Image (spheres, rainbow, N blue to C red):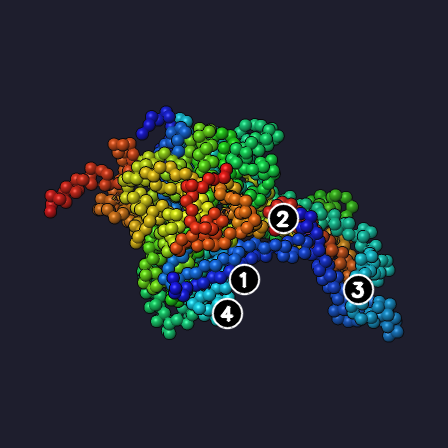
Amino acid sequence: MSKSNNNILEVKNLCTSFFTDEGEVKAVDGVDFFIEKGKTVGIVGESGSGKSITSLSILRLIQEPAGKIVNGEIIFKGENLLEKSKKEMRAIRGNNISMIFQEPMTSLNPTMTCGEQIAESIRIHQKLSRKEAKEKAIEMLKLVGIPSPEKRVKQYPFELSGGMRQRVMIAIALACNPELLIADEPTTALDVTIQAQILDLIRKLQKELGTSLMIITHDLGVVAEMCETVAVMYCGKIVEYADVKTILTNPKHPYTIGLLNSVPRHDQHYEGDLPVIKGSVPSPFNLPKGCRFATRCPHARDICHNQLPELKTMDDGNQVRCWIHTDVWEKQEEEVASNS
Amino acid sequence: MSKQPLLEVKNLKQYFPIKGGVLGRTVNHVKAVDDISFEVYEGETVSIVGESGCGKSTTGRAILRLDEPTAGEVNFDGEDLLSLNKSKMREKRKDLQIIFQDPYASLNPRQTVGQIIEEVLKIQNIGTSSKDRREKIISLLETVGIGAHQVDRYPHEFSGGQRQRIGIARALSVNPKLIICDEAVSALDVSIQAQVLNLLKELQRKFQLTYLFISHDLGVVRHISDRIIVMYLGKVVEISDTQSLFENPQHPYTRALLSAIPSMNFEEEKRERIILTGDVPSPIDPPKGCRFHTRCPYKMERCAIEEPVLNSVSDGQRVACHLVEKGAVDYTKIPVNS
Amino acid sequence: MLTFIIRRFLQIIPVMIGVTLAVFLMMHLIPGDPAQIMAGERADEAQVEQMRENLGLNDPLHEQYLRYVGNAIQGDLGTSIRTNRPVVNEIFDSRIWITIELAFWGTVLAVIFGLIAGIISATRKYSFADVSLMIVALFGMSMPNFWLGIMLIYFFSVNLGWFPIVGWESWKHMVLPVITIGSGGAAIIARMTRSSMLEVLDNDYIRTAHAKGVSERLVVYKHALRNALIPVVTVVGLQFGTLLGGAVITETVFAVNGIGRLVVDAIKARDFPMVQGAILVCAVAFVLVNFLVDIAYRLINKRIDLN
Ligand SMILES: Nc1ncnc2c1ncn2[C@@H]1O[C@H](COP(=O)(O)OP(=O)(O)OP(=O)(O)O)[C@@H](O)[C@H]1O
Ligand SMILES: Nc1ncnc2c1ncn2[C@@H]1O[C@H](COP(=O)(O)OP(=O)(O)OP(=O)(O)O)[C@@H](O)[C@H]1O
Ligand code: SF4
Ligand code: SF4
Ligand SMILES: [Mg+2]
Ligand SMILES: [Mg+2]
């Protein structure tokens, strides 16, 4: 889809596993994608499909020894983050790459004021004095649209509403003007009217500051409004990777199609039942041998149950992981036709 | 609509005291639900929507008397539930069931699925022998799509969607007339959510169930409801049939709520979006007059003084707003305050 | 905050009524006639009656109680039978200060060692250091004070001769009793800090701190410790009460003339006013310390102030 030198981030064959008493959980299992400078990539998928673990892996925030990045490369501006020392990683976190988490209620330290929490990353990365950092913190609060910021810097998170807390999280994340912002379900815990404010804010700041954005969500509406490219994940793997319009209007992978159909939409009139994806996500300890969606897929054939399809790049540059979109499928069809 | 409603809520109020001061006296109240009225007819699905903290769950809990309401009437099947004594109320609970958001928290982890349902059957004296009850349990679980071989498993052995099915089976076990679903599908993945929504619809047809469906997801609500109640800060601001609500919302808050939902619709040109400023005010000291006036883009002078009442704007659509007191209006022609 | 302090202070009143009532009734509930006991076993009927009259034991119970409380508020706790000096002087002239010194250093020791051990354990979960520290802590908790005291004397004073065996004169005298009295608390605080710290380290805001690029050290000491201390502070307060109890035994083992020993001596001598007075003073001290701990708790945990 693009030349590599324009990519701020390239994730190659990322594998992250958790080692539990019951066995290895391959939470992220060979994920590839990239983010172009200044662009927005969305990651969607069922709960447990590995979205958060992918994003935590990028910043190397996986809690060891329970979890471990077992394979892959994470190329940020041409350098592999997995080869960096702990100290070098710390200099990147919050400075070049920042992260916003889902729960604004629990993601802020309850015993530190909002000002302290914003100023902290400024002081770490920009080596400003306490006073300068505080002034910058007030400036940041103003930037994210918090009224009377001079008063708010002194307040504790419990004194703020959910929407305000998420604004503070954004202020922290953007304090050092990062090149890449990773937002893991930034608005899931918020009301729609507040969500609209926050998404608006992120979009505005992204345009102003030229930040690249990776947004994780399960809300296809958010994807439609925010992203240029979308990766759909299922059981630790990307099953479809395409521009947002293709994903929402002409998806190729049976899972994406099923997902899209089963969302009840507020802007559509309904008669009768919703189309569903039958069954449920397989347990991570008992993944199907072939295509991971085979247990639920309406098109599944023998080959799907036995052999994992590759992520194949199509003519339009979009990628799909499904046997239907390979020559094998057509060949089989011809065979079936000629046999009968 | 001349028939008798199955559920009639009249002037319901639920105030929670706030203790404070040196002596820990009640210094104020959270006016969680403040004088609301609505009806639910047999066999229909009525949804309550609104932002977090507007009083949706409190309404559901008050109807079941899980909290004792401060004032009002809850007429169910011709009887005022609030005037029943404890044992009469327990009997009535058979007709009114509730399903919660978190399927895991509401199932006892040390009981098998069979035991969980049997307990309810026993409390309500359903079934004569344990064999009889067992048969009933198995048929109930099969109704919600859980196989007979899974009866003796524990909740943690099921997925989220299956647990919610178990919750539904438990609610169904006593043959209720009304089921209150409080965010019953909110915690589920979309693909599973669709399955459970279809199941709820199917059961409604099969058993003539009536649902009071509490949710903040307007897509889900549009799909499942016949009528919708929109709440804001403890008040009902709009009651409408589903189609009118989505196609011609009349309360400024409903309009803002709908326009705030990110749309998946790609062909449609970018909509004019109403982005509300500020947060929802506190239900402890709600704004005087119209409670929405602090955020309303159409606010007029009288809005801060005079409280609007629910007023019929068209057949089946009632709205509490001064703007529409003389009937439905065309919002594209009304200037927005900056 | 001020409202909280006032409210918390008002809560002390019923507690104090309970305490004084209990101490007052103690006199009446123990078997035997207090007047008889106080007058001595050889006193005759008239002398006992005289004693009864002097003590006001013939008045109705509630009057006696009110008088007792009234006197106590004015700093009159009666006269010691054994020494014939006012109880207040006996307690406050020197005894209580020694105990306070002992309890204070015991608490300091418990807090410092407990916190350090707890933090080391939590940040190196399941490491050799963690496991050994927690085993030591388990011993520390289950070891009775008198036993530990005797062991310490045996090794460090008798065998090695590093510290004096008994008495309370220089810092050298203080070392072993303070260790004896503080070890239990240190063990409990260590275990508490560990579990609280582990819980806090699992929180989302710790992940946020890491994501900001905060160093491991600062994450532990700036972000986690403060939150982890919230439950620990409560334990420290409760620990102080146990410490006062432990003082009785420790002072006896090391022959320190503190209030603990005073109580023991008074009981032996059936010196009732003395026992009552000492217990009352200890109870008041306990209540006051808990009051201060609660205020400290609110200062750390700002969230509670709101409700
Ligand atoms: N600490 C852990 N120990 C074991 N397994 C884990 C751990 N953390 C995550 N996993 C597993 O990794 C997989 C991916 O988890 P992840 O949090 O990335 O999902 P997600 O896509 O973000 O889901 P959600 O939408 O629910 O946030 C899941 O199967 C989960 O069970
Ligand atoms: N037991 C209680 N004591 C005091 N206040 C309460 C109590 N229960 C609810 N409230 C308050 O009443 C208001 C309404 O709460 P309710 O749970 O009904 O909201 P809701 O509409 O269900 O919101 P959500 O979408 O978050 O579930 C809130 O402000 C809440 O804080
Ligand atoms: S590979 Fe087979 S099972 Fe998998 S999605 Fe494609 S058709 Fe379905
Ligand atoms: S009454 Fe006034 S403030 Fe309230 S919604 Fe209507 S126009 Fe807005
Ligand atoms: Mg996640
Ligand atoms: Mg609720």
Question: Mark 4 sits on what residue?
Answer: B84
Q: Which residue corresponds to the image point at 54% horizontal and 62% vertical from the top-left?
A: B71
Q: Quadrant of residue C67?
A: bottom right
Residue assigned mark 1: B71
Q: Which mark is residue C23?
A: none
**For the residue labelled by badge 2, is the local secondary structure a helix, a strand or a loop?**
helix
Horizontal side, residue A238 vs residue B213: left or right: left
Q: Position of residue B252 (x, y in %)?
A: 46, 46
Measuring from the top left, give residue B130's x and y in whole percent.
37, 71
Farthest front residue in view: B326
Residue at image coords 35%, 71%: B132
Give the residue type at disc 1: Ala
Nearer the observer, disc 1 or disc 3?
1
The reply to the same-chain question for discs 4 and 3 is no
Q: What residue is drawn where x is 29% and y is 44%?
A: A257
Viewer-side residue, C67 vs B185: B185
Q: In the image, is residue B47 above or below residue A328?
A: below
Residue occupied by mark 3: C66
Q: How many marks?
A: 4
In space, the residues marked 4 and 2 are separated at their CA atoms by 40 Å
Whether labels 1 and 3 share one chain: no
Q: Amino acid at mark 4?
A: Leu
What separation in Å lies between label 1 and label 2 (alpha carbons)? 31 Å
Q: First in sequence, mark 1 or 4: give its number.
A: 1
Picture layout, residue C23 above or below residue C42: above
Question: Between disc 3 and disc 2, whose residue precedes?
Answer: 3
Which chain letter matches label 2?
Answer: C
